[in-house]
Amino acid sequence: MSEIKYGFAPFYGRDARLLVLGSFPSVKSRKTEFYYGNSQNRFWRVLAEFFGDNLPHTVDDKKQFLLKNKVALWDVVAECEIEGSRDSTICNFKVADVENLLQKIDVRLIILNGGKAEEIFLDNFSDISVPYIKLPSTSPANTRFSKEEWFRGLSRVFNRS
């Protein structure tokens, strides 16, 4: 019998302009107790390059980086059963209360980080009025990742430095 795993609370500043929604924290992220904790995940490198900023390493550095750049993070799944870090094994899940978060912040765009995040988002939140786009997962398991697609998506909200 699988054990229920719990995701993180949303991380955001009141002036966030972008919300990035992943699917569910990986094993390494759950160990570090913050988003995108696998050093092989491309998320932090892509954002740091886009914003022309230093790569944040510690959880505190990552939080300051997000606040400074007006980026909010959360996952569409709040709790679930999952084997390891594989999105394909997510089952018996509860979705995050994305609508409630969107009442607290006035984001201009939601980026769905990967196919599973998009699938669950569309099944549960397709009527949200905030524009959203799916971008290739930043996971190291995704061989079809495109930094250029991420830069184009981020450019819909931010002027590139």
Image: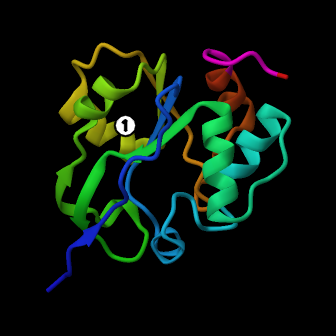
Residue 111, percent from left and from top = 49, 31
Q: Is residue 143 visible?
A: no
| Type of amino acid under label 1 | Glu
Magenta-tinted stretch = 155-160
Residue 125 located left or right of residue 76: left
Q: Quadrant of residue 150?
A: top right
Residue 105, percent from left and from top = 40, 25
Q: Is residue 158 magenta?
A: yes
Residue 77 located left or right of residue 36: left
Dot 1: what SS? helix
Q: Is residue 61 visible?
A: yes
Q: Is residue 27 magenta?
A: no
Outermost residue to the front: 14
Residue 78, percent from left and from top = 26, 55
The C terminus, quarter of image: top right
Question: Few, some or many C-alpha atoms within 10 Å of disc 1 (few <14, some 14-19, many ≥20)?
Answer: many
Residues 114 and 125: in front is 125
Question: Is residue 108 placed above or below 11 in the rendered structure?
Answer: above
Residue at position x 17%, y 53% in the image: 94
Residue at position x 33%, y 28% in the image: 104
Residue 90, percent from left and from top = 27, 62
Residues 128 and 64: in front is 64
Q: Quadrant of residue 87?
A: bottom left
Question: Is residue 129 placed above or below 68 in the rendered structure?
Answer: above
Q: Which residue is mark 1?
A: 118
Residues 109 and 92: in front is 109
Question: Is residue 106 placed above or below 82 in the rendered structure?
Answer: above
Residue at position x 77%, y 43% in the image: 48
Residues 16 and 20: in front is 16
